[in-house]
Amino acid sequence: MLPHEISNKPYAQSSEENKFVILQAIQGFLTERSSVLEIASGTGQHAVYFAEQMPHIKWQTSDLTDAHAGIKQWIADSDLNNVLPPLCLNVSENDWPATRYDALFSANSFHIMSKSNVEDLFAHLSQVLNANGLVMIYGPFNYNGQYTSESNARFDDWLKQRNPHSGIKAFEWCNQLAEQAGLNFLEDIEMPQNNRLLVWKI
Ligand SMILES: C[S@@+](CC[C@H](N)C(=O)[O-])C[C@H]1O[C@@H](n2cnc3c(N)ncnc32)[C@H](O)[C@@H]1O
């Protein structure tokens, strides 16, 4: 594989830094499962790393079309056959696949999405998850109307200046949407740098 400096692939330092701890948090949930739909794959770095580390999983990438070229480059350079080229999937459009998966994973997407995007994502879960399907969402969340850190508060300000519809979402609100979608809350795992991994099961 070419190093990112000369291969022109999109590269997110944050994905390199958090991929190991995310893998540690999600892999226990996936030992008996064989397919994952990733929403908002971004550069594709997480997908390639997780697919490599969990060869029994078929990892389906997806994102808005602009991200596809980069994801395809990461997949092509990986030589893996268990990571699938990106679906064009805007959670608020009619893009949702007809296929069902054993789990849905998304990292660092809820604070970028609008509230209605997140509502749309939860509303479509029952359509793409198999029985016993899991939902695993990584990123920052607020609790009881409070930020979990000063740095998350500053991050939220920055997000809202870029796009007033973006911003860190409340755990309680997400959990309510999950319950309305027929999911049961399973775990809320504390992650480094004031992030969480939220897990629900259908
Ligand atoms: C901060 S990036 C996170 C990327 C990657 N998951 C990671 O952890 O590095 C946010 C991603 O959300 C995607 N996104 C934003 N709005 C979306 C929508 N409505 N539907 C699907 N993906 C969306 C963006 O294209 C972008 O790839």
Image (cartoon, rainbow, N blue to C red):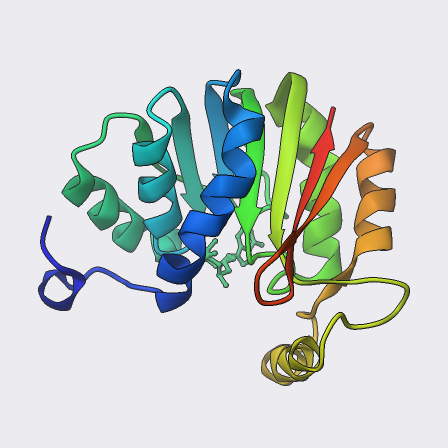
The mark tally for this picture is 0
User: Going by the picture, which residue comes out furthest to the right?
Assistant: 144
Image coordinates of residue 99 in percent, x first then y, are 51, 20
**Can residue 118 be seen from the camera position used here?**
yes
Image coordinates of residue 111 in percent, x first then y, are 64, 64
Residue sitting nearer the eye, 81 or 151 = 151
Residue at x 24% of width, y 48% of height: 74
Residue sitting nearer the eye, 78 or 68 = 78
Residue at x 57% of width, y 61% of height: 192
Image coordinates of residue 179 in percent, x first then y, are 86, 35
Q: Quadrant of the C terminus?
A: top right
Quadrant in the picture for residue 193 = bottom right
Eyeballing the image, is 117 above or below 34? below
For residue 122, side relative to residue 51 (left or right):
right
Quadrant in the picture for residue 148 = bottom right
Eyeballing the image, is 197 above or below 132? below
